Image (spheres, grey):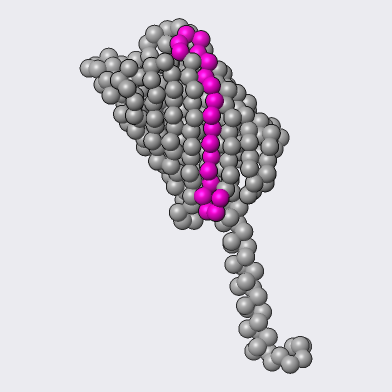
Amino acid sequence: MAPLGMTPPLLNRTRLVDRYRRAITIFFLLSVSALAHAQGGPPLVTDDPDTPGDRHWEINLATLIEHERSGGGRSTELDADINYGWGERIQLKVDVPLSRVSEAPVATTTGMGSTVFGVKWRFFDGGDYGLKVSTYPQFSTAWTASAVQRGLADSLHSYFLPIEVAKTVGLTTWVGEVGRSFVSDGSHEWMAGLVAARAVREGTTALMEVHQTRSVHGDLCLLNIGLRQELGHRLSVLTSVGHEFGPVAADPRGLLLYAGIQIRR
């Protein structure tokens, strides 16, 4: 029975308006929630405080190409970046690359590059719209000195001790990372990165990154642009292209390309 004072057509119209309002509200909340997730990590260099979640996996499979201005280059035929969520705030990582190095004009070497082990801990979490802060210690090893000699790895061992922060302001998520790299057989480095991420349409996020590396050889500045395209709840396509600026002594990379997929389960 219709409420007093309301005819059946008016009642139906009122119910329809309420349904539209609920649908719009739910869509808005879901959209904002999706933007609230930090957007660092692959395909970029700068990482973010987010973790996969308790007992969840995040696997990034990609091909990377680096072309140096000196004429040589390194490509990663397959980079397997495997991450596991141990609780809601801890991430365990292992990254195993199969690399190929080309030295002008014809010499080519293929083999295992540096394997990276890491543990990320998000020790401060302000929620979807608040500040998030994490630390992400990582250990990298080339396993053998011959991998360094052949150019498949930059150093035999290195440690990276960074801090990551993230905050969503309006429709843009900002991610920052700063850390110190300690190299066993080379010069230590300071690294810092800043990322801006924004959804340009449903399922597509545009990324922009500025990443700075400082060493005794000089400063290198990497400019990166990228895209994340969702292909469902468990799969994304990751792409980026970048250019590095710096002195010749620091051997900047003229072109960086990243193309891969992210599998979540």
Front residue (pair 17, 158):
158
At which x and y percent is residue 132? 63, 40
Q: Is residue 73 above or below residue 62?
A: above
Q: Is residue 264 above or below residue 110?
A: below
Which quadrant holds the C terminus? Answer: top right
**In the rendered image, is residue 233 in sight?**
no
Q: Residue furthest top?
A: 145
Assess whether residue 171 is covered by the magenta stretch. yes
**In the rendered image, is residue 76 in sight?**
yes
Identify the residue shown where x is 63% and y is 83%: 13
Displayed quadrant of residue 165: top right
| Magenta residue span | 169-187
Displayed quadrant of residue 125: top right
At which x and y percent is residue 63? 41, 31
At which x and y percent is residue 64? 39, 30
Identify the residue shown where x is 26% and y is 21%: 71
Front residue (pair 107, 130):
130
Identify the residue shown where x is 74% and y is 92%: 5
Q: Is residue 108 left or right of residue 4?
A: left
Assess whether residue 170 is covered by the magenta stretch. yes
Q: Total marks drawn?
A: 0
Front residue (pair 128, 245):
245
Identify the residue shown where x is 76% and y is 88%: 3
Magenta span: predominant SS is strand
Q: Is residue 162 left or right of residue 53?
A: left
Q: Is residue 132 left or right of residue 171?
A: right
Displayed quadrant of residue 29: bottom right
Which quadrant holds the N terminus? Answer: bottom right
